[in-house]
Image (cartoon, grey):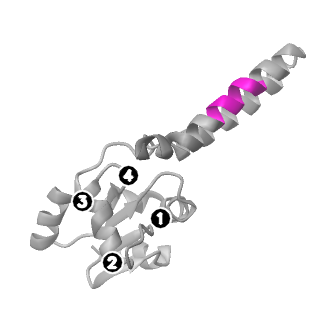
Amino acid sequence: MKSLLHWSSAIALIAVAVMMLAVYGNRGQWGQAVVVAAILLAAAWLLSPLFGGRQSPWSALRQDQEREPGVVIFWRPGCVYCMRMMASLGRTRRKAQWVNIWRDAEAASFVREHNDGNETVPTVILRDGVYTNPDPETVRRELVRG
């Protein structure tokens, strides 16, 4: 059931996109129909659990962190603050390890441990500690430095 909740926003946007295609298409306004549907489908992709691509599991990254600390960013699809972090970091975001807490129960547990039982993201591991929703510039400086 929890998995379905993760998909609910994306499914709703896809349904609205299909309805908009039908409504605008019925009126013969196919150009508008395609534009509106494309925008809604792009938003559905950003909110879906599929957004973010392949990632390493937290269990493997945790072992790496003990040997060679790096930047780890815990996030989840649909989180506005996570999208802001991704956009603000630009290309430097590739240097960080991203962990989707909806795909990794251990990662979600780690985030809850550091946020009073809440799954507040982005939660970021930097060299000097764990931070909840840090300033993207702080994270960028760490990525460039490291």
> Which residue lies most toward the right here?
27
- Location of residue 131 in the rendering, given as x and y in whole percent from the top left corner: 38, 79
User: Would you identify the image quadrant in which residue 92 lies?
Assistant: bottom left
Three-letter amino acid code of the residue under disc 3: Glu
Magenta stretch holds residue 107: no
* Crowd tier of the residue under label 3, counting other residues whose Cα lies within 10 Å: few below 14, some 14–19, many 20 or above: some
Tell me how far mark 2 sits from mark 4, CA to CA: 17 Å
Residue corresponding to mark 4? 102
1 and 4 marks in contact (CB < 8 Å): no
Residue corresponding to mark 1? 89
Q: Is residue 30 visible?
A: no
- Location of residue 62 in the rendering, given as x and y in whole percent from the top left corner: 17, 65
Q: Secondary structure at mark 2?
A: helix
Highlighted range, magenta: 13-20
1 and 3 marks in contact (CB < 8 Å): no
Mark 1 vs mark 3, foreground winner is 3
Of the numbered discs 1 and 4, the one sitting upstream in the chain is 1
Q: Quadrant of the N terminus?
A: top left
Residue corresponding to mark 3? 106
Of the numbered discs 2 and 1, the one sitting upstream in the chain is 1
Q: Secondary structure at mark 1?
A: helix
* Crowd tier of the residue under label 4, counting other residues whose Cα lies within 10 Å: few below 14, some 14–19, many 20 or above: some
Q: Residue at x 54, y 39 (%)?
A: 45
- Location of residue 59 in the rendering, given as x and y in whole percent from the top left corner: 17, 58
Residue corresponding to mark 2? 114
